Image (cartoon, rainbow, N blue to C red):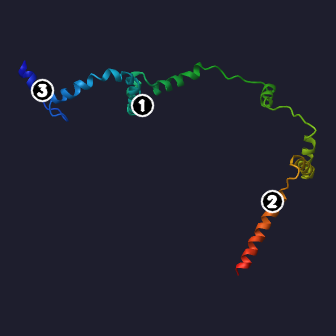
Amino acid sequence: MSSLARLLNTFPVPLFGSVRTAAAFTLPKAKTLPRFAGWLGPGAVGALWFVWPAVDDGWKIEMGLKADPEAAKKAADAAPADAPKKVELSVEALAKVEDAYKAEEVNTEDDEPLAKAVATGDFSYFEEKWEAFSEKSGRPGEDDDDDDEDDDDDDEDDDEDDDDDE
């Protein structure tokens, strides 16, 4: 028996040289496996995620993991005979279905000037309203034109500086 053990221990193993060296390395590592048991599930999911696309569809169908497209086609061909007939709607019912999504128009007093302006193409009424709104909403003493004048003054100062250099 010892000669058989000696023979097995000297049997060559890639990377380790012999079975004895491989066993001496692997057995202490195997003792630490229980603390990695929690990673067994996520590791299996990751491996399947990587390998599953490479698995043949025929094998998946054979194992019942995927629906058989041929059986589905046969079922679809047989289904029209068993399928219920289409429901035919009357003309009135079809008209109601077509108009079901349309809401009744609610006209307010603001809609009349808008409709009039759209029809004539004259939006001056709204321009006047917008001007009045702009004046009401602006802060007293705030004037955007002042900023433009300041920019113009800066440009003039720059021009004068350029004239002095010549």
Task: Residue 63 in the image: state x and y as whole percent.
Answer: 39, 22
Res 13 → quadrant:
top left
Tag nearer the camera, 1 or 2: 2
Judge left or right: residue 18 versus residue 159: left
Judge left or right: residue 3 versus residue 18: left
The residue drawn where x is 86% and y is 48% is 139
Quick check: can you spot residue 26? yes
- Which numbered disc, 1 or 3, marks the residue that appears first in the sequence? 3
Q: 123 or 90: which is nearer to us?
A: 123
Quick check: can you spot residue 57? no
| Amino acid tagged 1 | Trp
- Which numbered disc, 2 or 3, marks the residue that appears first in the sequence? 3
Gap in angstroms between the C-alphas marked 1 and 3: 38 Å
| Amino acid tagged 3 | Asn
Gap in angstroms between the C-alphas marked 1 and 2: 64 Å
Tell me how many marks there are: 3
Density class for disc 2 (Cα within 10 Å; few <14, some 14-19, many ≥20) is few
Task: Residue 85 in the image: state x and y as whole percent.
Answer: 66, 21
Residue underneath mark 1 = 49
Q: Which mark is residue 9?
A: 3
| Amino acid tagged 2 | Asp
**SS at mark 1?**
helix
**SS at mark 3?**
helix
Task: Residue 40 in the image: state x and y as whole percent.
Answer: 37, 23
Density class for disc 1 (Cα within 10 Å; few <14, some 14-19, many ≥20) is few
The residue drawn where x is 27% and y is 22% is 31
Residue underneath mark 2 = 147
Q: Which mark is residue 33?
A: none
Task: Residue 36 in the image: state x and y as whole percent.
Answer: 35, 24
